[in-house]
Image (spheres, rainbow, N blue to C red):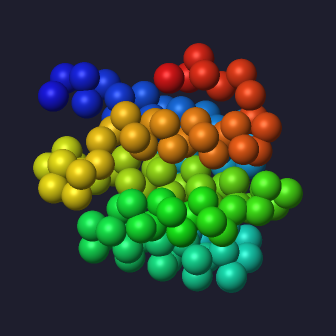
Amino acid sequence: MVEQDYIMRLIKESVRMLMKLLFNIDTASPAMEQLESLERQSIYNGLEEKLDEGAINEAEEELFEGLDETNREDLKLAIMFYSYLNEKDDEFLAAHQFSRQEIKDGLMDVLHRYGVTGMEGLF
């Protein structure tokens, strides 16, 4: 439990730092409105709904399939996805066979896909 809380806080602070450094957005909880494109807002909304329904693996797969590594707005969307997922409690994650470690790993994978290197120290 303590380790999960630590990972949760680490992810939250890492997201805050990434949003500030990469997009000049200072927030601990990024919101859909911070996506500039209506299309990306719609995609994010759909992913958020799947997360709320507990279809975490399906939502994550859809996220990765739709990522365009040349579009920084997709990077922002992915960071927001993991931030939202990180706000779910441990019971919700466990009930849907997902862990904080998987959130961290997914976020790191996204950063590597976009060439945002040297962030391993965040975690």
For the point 53% across and 33% down, the residue is 14
Rendered image quadrant of residue 21: top right
Rendered image quadrant of residue 62: bottom right
Left or right: 24 as drawn, with respect to 17? right
The N terminus, quarter of image = top left
Q: Is residue 1 above or below residue 28?
A: above
Numbered marks: total: 0
For the point 67% across and 40% down, the residue is 111
Rendered image quadrant of residue 113: top right
In the current view of this chain or complex, which residue is farthest to the right? 70
On the question of residue 20 being in view, the answer is no
Left or right: 90 as drawn, with respect to 50? left
Residue 33 position, x and y percent, is 59, 71
Q: Is residue 51 above or below residue 94?
A: below
Residue 18 position, x and y percent, is 64, 38
Residue 35 position, x and y percent, is 67, 67
Q: Is residue 119 above or below residue 37?
A: above
On the question of residue 84 being in view, the answer is yes
For the point 37% across and 34% down, the residue is 101
Which of the pair 81/12 is nearer the observer? 81
For the point 42% across and 43% down, the residue is 103
